[in-house]
Structure formats: C-alpha cells, structure tokens
Amino acid sequence: GRNCSIIIWQIFLLASITLERFNLKISDFTGLAYYSDIPLTGRLETGDAMLNHLLSNISWGQEGNFIDVPTDCPQRDERMGWTADTQVFVPTASYLTDSYAFYRKYLYDMRMEQSHNEGAVPHVIPSFGRRESCSVWGDAVCIMPWSLYLFYGDQQILEESYESMKDWVAYIGRVDGENHGWRDIFRFGDWLALDHPAGGKDQTAGDMRGMTLRQVMARYGDNAEMASRFDRLDEMLGRL
C-alpha cells in the first residue's frame, strides 16, 4: 500500500503497542508532552516531598489541559473547553504561568460564539454547535476578564469583554422575565451545582456572584444605566 503519515493525539498514562505486523521495535517510538507554549512565571518548592509532588501534578495538569483551548480533563475523550472549569482555574494558571494571551484568545472565541447565540454563552468553547447555557458556566464571560485584570492589570481585557458581559446579563433578564424563568433553566448537578435544599439566596449564589461582579464592572465603566440594571437584578435574585 501507499505510504502515509497519520497524526494522532491521545492522552494516556500507559500505552500497549502490538508489533507483530510491523518491523518495529520499542525504540522506534517517542512519547512527547504536547501543550501550548506558555512561559512559566511561578514556582514553589517546599520541604515536603508529597506537597512538592502535588504542586508538580498541578503544573502538569495545566499543561495537559492547555492545548490551544483550556480543557477540563486530559483523560477524557471529548477534550472540550468547558467554561466553568476554565473560569475557576484562571487564578491558579495566572500564578504559575503568563497565561494572559492564552486566555485572551479563549475569551475572543467565547465572544464570537456568544454573538451567534443571542447573548447566551455556550457550556463549551468552541461550542461545536451546542447552544445550551446556564449560570456559573455562562458567568465565565464576566469572571474571567475580571480575574485576568486583577492579575495582569490590563484594562484592555475589560474593554474587550464589556459588551459581552452586558449581552449575558440581558440574556438572563429575558429568560427570567416576569415569572423568574431563570430558576427553571438546566444546571449541572455536579461540583458547581446550585440545587441547595435550602433554596433562596443559597440556591442562587452563583447567579448573585455573577451579578455582583457585573455590577462592579458597570460602575468601573462609568455606565450608570447598566449599574442601575444590575442593582435591580441583584435585588430580584435576593428575593428568590
């Protein structure tokens, strides 16, 4: 048959290779660690070997998940850029590496997806055509720029994301309507769940965090109309 080259990207701890059909030996194979080239800026070493191993695992975990987009689990076959997993890791990544440009590109992709989704932020970026959205996951469009600003001090990331933040708030308002429809939107029942049995403010903690952050952003942008809108939304969420 004709010769051809095939590039396969797999994540694994151990690999089993059967060589009977080919004239190959183990030394013909090379394992490479493949990840986006992001400069290392932070390092911590302690006198505790187990803690040092944990810190090493965190760094390797970041590298295994930073391949053009920030993914959530390197061992999963889907390899998608889940927004909630991404937004909670921004501070860690910013301590360890100069990740500003990497996240800025991801936020650009997020804005492009959102612009074709009536203000809603898909669960994964790129969305691969999936258009669902919910709190905490969608709040990444607000939390990530703010976290990056706190770490890097570049106001441009806020300016670039400001319209997307407003679109996200407007989308929530439309869905909520007069009957608090936002409460009925699907939310993931996992480690970022909002289904607290007590209900009330505890149930909407993620929404209120996002709303409060957007309120700060509106005031930072000196937009009194948007700040007033966020005040009303915060008040509405507090009554749920």
Image: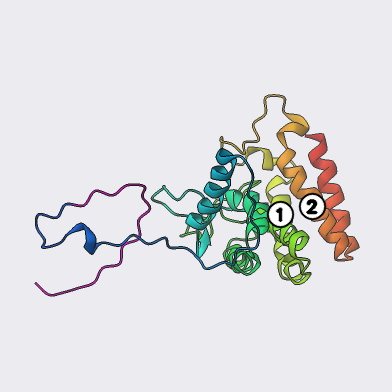
144 on left or right of 55 = right
Check whether the beta carbons of the residues at disc 2 and disc 1 lie within 8 A of each other: yes
Secondary structure found at label 1: helix
**In what element is the residue under mark 2?**
helix
Q: Is residue 14 magenta?
A: yes
Which secondary structure type mostly characterizes the magenta part of the structure?
Answer: loop
- The amino acid beneath tag 1 is Ile
- Density class for disc 1 (Cα within 10 Å; few <14, some 14-19, many ≥20) is many
Instruction: Where is residue 43? Give x, y as percent.
Output: 64, 55
Question: Mark 1 = which residue?
Answer: 143
Question: Of residues 47 and 216, which is closer to you in this image?
Answer: 47
Q: Is residue 84 magenta?
A: no
Is 76 left or right of 163, judged from the image as shown?
A: left
Q: Work out whether 33 lies above or below 210.
A: below
- Identify which amino acid the numbered label 2 is placed on: Leu
Q: Position of residue 104 (x, y in %)?
A: 64, 67
Badge 2 crowding class, 10 Å Cα cut-off, few under 14, some 14 to 19, many 20 or more, is some
In the rendered structure, find residue 94 and report the number of the disc placed on it. Answer: none
Where is the N terminus found, in terms of image quarters? bottom left
